[in-house]
Image (cartoon, coloured by chain):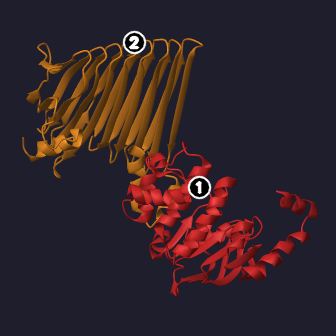
Chain colours: A red, B orange
Amino acid sequence: MLELQHINYITEDGRKILDDISVSIEDHFVVITGPNGSGKSTLARVISGILSPDSGRILLNGEDITGLSVTERARKGISYAFQQPVRFKGLTVKDLMSLAAGKEAGVPELCDLLSEVGLCAKDYIDRELDGSLSGGELKRIEIAMAFARNSELTLFDEPEAGIDLWSFQKLIRVFETMVKKTDGNILIISHQERILDIADKIIYLRDGRIEKYGRREDVLPEIMGTAGGACSVLTEKMKEE
Amino acid sequence: MGAIEDNILKEVAGLDALPAGAYNIRTNGASSARQTTANIDIVTKEDKPGIDIRIKPGTVNESVHIPVIVSQAGLKDMVYNDFFIGEGADVTIVAGCGIHSCGDADSAHDGIHTFYVEEGAKVRYVEKHYGEGDADATGKRLMNPTTVVHLAKDAQMVMETAQIAGIDDTLRKTTADLADGAKLEIHESVMTTGTQNAESEFSADLNGEDCSCNIVSRTVAKEQSRQHYTSILNGNNRCAGHTECDSIIMDQAYVLATPQLAAATTEASLIHEAAIGKIAGEQLIKLMTLGLSEQEAEEQIISGFLK
């Protein structure tokens, strides 16, 4: 269980990105959603330890992890799939997957993990994670790495970003399977209705505050309605898309 | 050979035992073991130190190992090795030099390797430089390898060089000339630490029609070490040339990269790329989110980069 208590995060130029966030996350599959700039990615970075909050506490299974480094939190069971995957010159898919799994990953294992994200292991294991891979390929490998860790809490920052529609259908199934297979909790930042549809609970973040948090069936109809308050032309266009 | 020599042999040539195929092992300035095959002859030069390696035309799937071991303090070894690779041959040549210093005098190995690669022949040339020493040894380990490559029509050479540890001062010079359709590919890996100094100079004359040359250098400069990379590609015909030097700089190190291109015809297509920078913070963070410490992450990034 992850518990955030009164988390505040202010940028160097004084902008408040996270404003008194308090929430307990114990459900299996929780989606954080909200408009751009609402603080979703910052929240993920604070949970994983990349950013330190200006105030507040973070507890994992009752243990205060606020002062722990990224490495220590990773070892306690927090995984984080970045929105923008990182490129590495020289390190191969197999190298990274092995580091993620914490052991030398064999071909059958890599095959299982990579096929989940729609990649054929034999075409990829010796490829470097550099400019020779497309953004979509890197993104899928990033997601596969998170799966490989099989952690207590896995954070995904917009897994759908940079993935084509065909793969996205499969990605939904991947998350559905993962929900069934793992005991760990999944916390996923997403704007995608299909992902919101399979959430146990939804956190709706706006201007750095949790505006709504509850069961999907309660929150989803409400947030779908709130868009009407914004520019109507824009929301119509978004629906068409 | 003793344990020191065995270890050096393992580091520079990946050998636990005497290799299959042709070989010549040079220990402290003299040949200590040699084997030739029906297709590969090794002959000691009479006018100067060194050997001629003659590979018959059409020789395929054979290899030559010519490691050099310097384990005597104060030894200044200078050697000229010439390689004659006959038409249509396809061979691997593994060279390399290891210095183990044990005293306070400088040990040095300067090698001049000249390759005559005949029409349609293919060579993979692997060269590794390594230095180690006793804890109390103050003598410097110096290496100045020169490689001269002559590629005849449609000849191909892949050259992989690595200098990862223990060489205090090095000036590596590589020059090449390419005839019609010839192809040269060079991959260099260098890591310097402490107050080491490493200089690499590459120069290739792309003389033949449709010849091509690709030079890729990846280096890591740590602590107070210094590196200087120079490459010049001379495009004298319809040709393709690419040179790339990519360095990770750390601590108080200094890296100078000066890739140069010269075209003497509109048909020459030449590209150079150079990048120097520290390890990207996001790379470290990504590996730390996988549970690696910052130091482990750094080691992974460097070893991958130099692979």
Q: Residue type at mark 2?
A: Lys
Q: Residue at x 89, y 67 (%)?
A: A230
Q: Is residue B99 above or below residue A151?
A: above
Q: Is residue B88 left or right of residue A200?
A: left
Residue A212: give x, y in percent of width and height: 76, 81
**Dot 1, crowdedness within 10 Å: few (<14), some or many (≥20)?**
many
Element under label 2? Answer: loop
Q: Residue type at mark 1?
A: Lys
Q: Which residue is mark 1?
A: A139
**Res B251 visible:** no
**Which quadrant of the figure has residue A223?**
bottom right
Element under label 1? Answer: helix
Q: Which numbered disc covers residue B153? A: 2
**Dot 2, crowdedness within 10 Å: few (<14), some or many (≥20)?**
many
Residue B62: give x, y in percent of width and height: 23, 27
Q: Residue at x 12, y 37 (%)?
A: B18
Q: Is residue B73 above or below residue A202?
A: above
Tell me the quarter of the image containing the N terminus of chain A: bottom right
Q: Residue at x 75, y 70 (%)?
A: A34
- Which chain does tag 2 point to? B
